[in-house]
Amino acid sequence: MSKNKEVIDALSAPTPKERINFRVGFKNKSNTKACMLAYVDARFVMDRLDEAVGKENWSTEYDVVGNHLFCRLTIKWPDGSSTTKADCGMETEVDAEKGQVSDAFKRAAVHYGIGRDLYSMKQYWADLSNGYVERDWKPIGWDSSAQQDNSELTTTSSQVTESQPPTEVNEAQEKIKKLAKQAEDRGEGQELKPKSDLKQGTPPENEYVRIKNLNKVRESDKSYLLIPSSFKGDTGDFEATKPYWVPKSKIKDLVAMPSGKFNLDVERWIAEQTLPNGEVKYEFEEIPQSKGSSANLSDEFEKHDLDDDDLPF
């Protein structure tokens, strides 16, 4: 095994149970149970980088592109080569600037495998007391063993392969500059143009359709990045994911489901758009209108604003 591969395996090793915390993802409508999301803080990511590659062999740089703060995380490998991977963060209600920096850092680290196993973790539900979850909540039996239980976490380290010829820092800079130019050309958060046969303004009920089982990857002030489950690419690839940004102004309802996926009610022309290669972007269905059906997704589950300062997101 090469030294580079040893470092890659160390970066993507399962997250120790004692470093995993939980927070409320969303609550059921009756406000009696909450779906709990596992997360790690930025300190864990720093510790993992220090242990796997050495304190002197990793660094971060930050750039603002439009309304997004991007973190470029560079790792120097044992063979002397370097790789840079980048991702953007989102503000938090507690401390907008600090939260965005922390979030961007952790998202960039996920591209190296750090904390990626939390995305495939089994779902946990907590009982609510007066609408709240007890402080430092953990699943029953969670602390009974300091060892990682592989039945609860499915590591995805096999998806992290040894790096291709290293990406120089200036390549990441060029990618961010390109993204900034695209944002400038079209206006940050500028909405897509609807088909000419649909009227502007608030459409009637039958011009909305429903898209199910989406992954909410990122959020800006004006848009959500909503990726279908069928997407096989890298969610950190700016070009590949660009068609999946959905303007908030065109959304009627967006609700987190118990599975962790999101269901979306959106204007029809958004759902009917195709990708540059001609393939269908989203599979959608008509919104039930019959008596007894739920016209709004929020009638089924209560929305919950997540704190995006921690993984996963």
Image: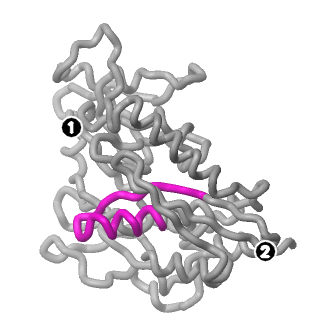
Query: Within 10 Å of the Cα at label 2, are there few (<14), some (14-19), or many (20+) other Cα atoms?
Result: some
Q: Residue furthest left?
A: 130
Residue in view at x 51 percent, y 44 percent: 177
Report the Cα–Cα distance between label 2 and label 1: 54 Å
Q: Position of residue 181 (x, y in %)?
A: 46, 37
**13 relative to 77 in the view: left or right:** left
Q: Is residue 64 left or right of 49 when viewed as pictured? A: left
Q: Which residues are magenta?
A: 85-105
As rendered, which of 1 and 252 lies closer to the eye?
Answer: 1
Residue 47 location (% of width, % of height): 55, 83
User: Of the residues shown, which amino acid type is indicated by label 1?
Assistant: Asn
Locate the N terminus and report the quarter of the image it occupies.
bottom right
Q: Does residue 118 lie above or below 240 as drawn?
A: below
Q: Residue at x 20, y 67 (%)?
A: 32
Image coordinates for residue 255, horizontal then vertical, percent:
29, 47
Q: Which residue is mark 1?
A: 296
